[in-house]
């Protein structure tokens, strides 16, 4: 058990080193001279003075060897200091942290909606295969994955904001503005959760302990509530973590459409404005978080499921 | 039980060899009839869309790029069946031609992902040890990674372009295939005929290509079809953000992005391109679903 934990944390560290190296090299990989880019961002459209570029290079310490620069950058990054945004001139660290909170709220709401619908739907359809509820579940799993969010979002805005005037069409003020984006974002995870929880529940209902519970005189609903759900929900936990990690930065389109100041929009705008420090900071943070979330989910899975735990020990 | 060799054997009547192979068409029909109905419906729908996209340059009523500011945001008429957009371009023509880039990009990406993922997964499972460990840890790392973000970073570094798009979506996209192919291979590995092949002295490469991959191909094909919609929507999302297909070209997602502001005045401008993406994604998902209904036992073992 401890060996696995140790091994996992080593891999975690190695990953972070590789990712930080990649992020550090972003300005060098894109071809241009990073110092020139910085000076250009200060002077706007005016011509860049070569002497100013050299002065800036020395001032920023970019004339030192690359590995010294990397170690210095890494040391600062570990303390949450990724430099200053080219555009807003404010420190990148707090900016990323603010965006992460927003994206986390949005992702958790969306996944909460997905889970609240998918778990009962998947469970019920597994209990009554071929019946009406199963048809609904199949329809959901097939249709919802095919809905592009950049189509569903404007249509939802059209109906609920413009025609009915119930919800705000964009922005990030209060819970009301959370509803539309979260619902739009929840469609695809909802489909996958339904699919997985149905399949898992199907398997669980075949298990001997379900037959045992039934033969003790419990009816179907009692059996599922007491014995089925906890085991059937197991694969969904893993999937939930995967989606949480994915949505932290992966909801770019929805965040751009609804003007939500989250991680996705931060990255998108950094790309559009060629804002290298923001790109680096958000890249490192997102990868670190997604790796961390997945490692935690694995740990949780092992802790919850004794069978897996035993298999891992041997 | 013993056999009495002296007993007179019953005269055997030899049937004339009448086993003719059924025709290809009959085989295809039989294949389709064995599947779930969604396979047939999905195939039909997707074939229609594909044919329309292929022949669109010759059947479109107007030049999809021709602007006419006098006729901007016009409703449906005899001349423009679906009306025009904010620059007076014919919606029907743009709709017919607008899926070419994204569907091809999505398909190419998906094939690359499936091939690379399957190979790495099979190698991982057949080799085991350190190779297996490394490949699977890389999969663990990448599988949770949002492909949109990777694509945006790649585009930020290397600039927009179809190659960048395909490469960046493949970097993350191969991982589910690798995980699945590994699971399938481990299952196939425990079968008798693999033991038999090993005892007969077949090489590792031979076993992989002769026994493992042919047996794993059906469930992997099903998953490929199921993931196509996701790829198509991702490519569209990047185009929507202005990082995929570039503006002079007509593209469904790009059309959606351009007509956002006019959604209230001309809802059809938003409804139609989205519906096109949705139907394309749905039809391929149905194909995958139909394939999976039959081969479910094989695919379940991989999870």
Image (cartoon, rainbow, N blue to C red):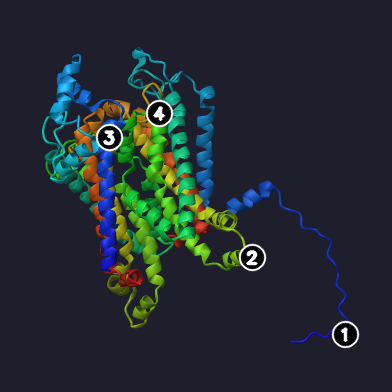
Residue contact at pointers 2 and 3, CB within 8 angstroms: no
Residue contact at pointers 1 and 2, CB within 8 angstroms: no
Disc 1 designates what residue? Answer: B6
First in sequence, mark 2 or 4: give its number: 2
Disc 3 designates what residue? Answer: A26
**Whether residue A28 is situated above or below residue A141 in the rendered picture:** above
Closest to the camera, between mark 2 and mark 4, is: 2
Chain assignment, label 4: B
Disc 4 designates what residue? Answer: B251
Closer to us: A145 or A64? A64
Residue contact at pointers 3 and 1, CB within 8 angstroms: no
Q: Secondary structure at mark 2?
A: loop
Q: CA distance from mark 2 to mark 3?
A: 52 Å
What residue is shown at x 30% (from left), y 53% (from top)? A242
Chain assignment, label 3: A
First in sequence, mark 4 or 1: give its number: 1
Marks 4, 3 in one chain: no
Disc 2 designates what residue? Answer: B200
Closer to us: B183 or B72? B183
Q: CA distance from mark 4 to mark 3?
A: 30 Å
Closest to the camera, between mark 4 and mark 1, is: 1
Q: CA distance from mark 2 to mark 4?
A: 55 Å
Crowd tier of the residue under label 2, counting other residues whose Cα lies within 10 Å: few below 14, some 14–19, many 20 or above: few
Name the quarter where the N terminus of chain B is drawn.
Answer: bottom right
What residue is shown at x 59% (from left), y 58% (from top)? B203
**Whether residue B198 is situated above or below residue A218 in the rendered picture:** above
Closest to the camera, between mark 3 and mark 1, is: 3
Closest to the camera, between mark 1 and mark 2, is: 2
């Amino acid at each position: 058990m401890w060996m696995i934990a140790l091994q996992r944390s080593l891999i975690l560290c190695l990953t972070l080193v590789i990712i930080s190296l990649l992020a550090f090299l972003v300005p060098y990989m894109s071809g241009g001279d990073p110092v020139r880019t910085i000076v250009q961002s200060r002077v706007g459209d005016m011509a860049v003075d070569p002497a100013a570029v050299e002065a800036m290079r020395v001032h920023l310490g970019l004339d030192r060897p690359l590995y010294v620069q990397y170690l210095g950058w890494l040391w600062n990054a570990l303390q949450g200091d990724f430099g200053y945004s080219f555009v807003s001139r404010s420190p990148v660290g707090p900016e990323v942290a603010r965006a992460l909170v927003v994206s986390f709220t949005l992702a958790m709401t969306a996944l909460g909606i997905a889970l609240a619908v998918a778990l009962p739907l998947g469970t019920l359809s597994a209990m009554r295969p071929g019946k009406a509820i199963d048809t609904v579940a199949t329809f959901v799993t097939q249709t919802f994955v095919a809905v592009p969010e950049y189509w569903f979002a404007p249509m939802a805005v059209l109906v609920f904001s413009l025609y009915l005037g119930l919800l705000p069409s964009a922005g990030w003020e209060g819970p009301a503005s959370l509803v539309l984006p979260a619902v739009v974002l929840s469609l695809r995870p909802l489909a996958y959760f339904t699919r997985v929880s149905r399949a898992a529940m199907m398997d669980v209902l075949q298990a001997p302990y379900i037959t045992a519970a039934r033969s003790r005189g419990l009816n179907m609903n009692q059996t599922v509530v007491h014995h089925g759900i906890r085991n059937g929900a197991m694969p969904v936990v893993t999937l939930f973590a995967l989606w949480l990690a994915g949505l932290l930065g992966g909801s770019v389109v929805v965040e751009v459409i609804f003007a939500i100041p989250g991680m996705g929009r931060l990255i998108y705008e950094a790309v559009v404005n060629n804002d290298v420090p923001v790109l680096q900071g958000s890249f490192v943070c997102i990868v670190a978080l997604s790796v961390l979330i997945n490692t935690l989910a694995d740990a949780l899975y092992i802790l919850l499921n004794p069978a897996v735990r035993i298999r891992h020990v041997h | 039980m013993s056999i009495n060799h002296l007993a007179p054997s019953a005269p055997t009547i030899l049937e004339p060899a009448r086993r003719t192979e059924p025709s290809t068409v009959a085989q295809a029909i039989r294949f389709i009839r064995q599947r779930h109905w969604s396979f047939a419906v999905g195939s039909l729908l997707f074939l229609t869309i594909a044919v329309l996209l292929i022949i669109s340059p010759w059947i479109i009523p107007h030049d999809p790029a021709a602007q006419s500011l006098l006729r901007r945001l016009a409703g449906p008429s005899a001349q423009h069946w679906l009306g025009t957009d904010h620059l007076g371009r014919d919606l029907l023509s743009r709709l017919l031609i607008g899926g070419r880039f994204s569907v091809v990009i999505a398909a190419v990406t998906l094939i690359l992902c499936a091939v690379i993922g399957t190979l790495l997964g099979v190698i991982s499972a057949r080799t085991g040890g350190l190779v297996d460990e490394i490949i699977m840890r890389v999969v663990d790392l990448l599988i949770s990674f949002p492909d949109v973000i990777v694509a945006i970073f790649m585009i930020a570094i290397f600039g927009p372009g179809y190659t960048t798009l395909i490469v960046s979506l493949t970097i993350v996209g191969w991982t589910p295939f690798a995980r699945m192919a590994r699971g399938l291979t481990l299952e196939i590995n425990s079968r008798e005929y693999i033991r038999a092949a090993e005892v007969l002295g077949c090489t590792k490469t031979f076993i992989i290509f002769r026994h493992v991959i042919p047996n794993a191909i059906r469930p992997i094909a099903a998953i490929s079809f199921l993931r196509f919609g996701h790829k198509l929507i991702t490519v569209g999302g990047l185009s929507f953000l202005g990082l995929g297909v570039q503006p002079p070209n007509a593209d469904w997602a790009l059309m959606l992005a351009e007509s956002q502001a006019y959604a209230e005045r001309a809802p059809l401008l938003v409804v139609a391109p989205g519906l096109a993406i949705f139907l394309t994604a749905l039809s391929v998902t149905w194909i995958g679903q139909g394939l999976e209904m039959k081969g479910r036992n094989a695919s379940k073992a991989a999870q």
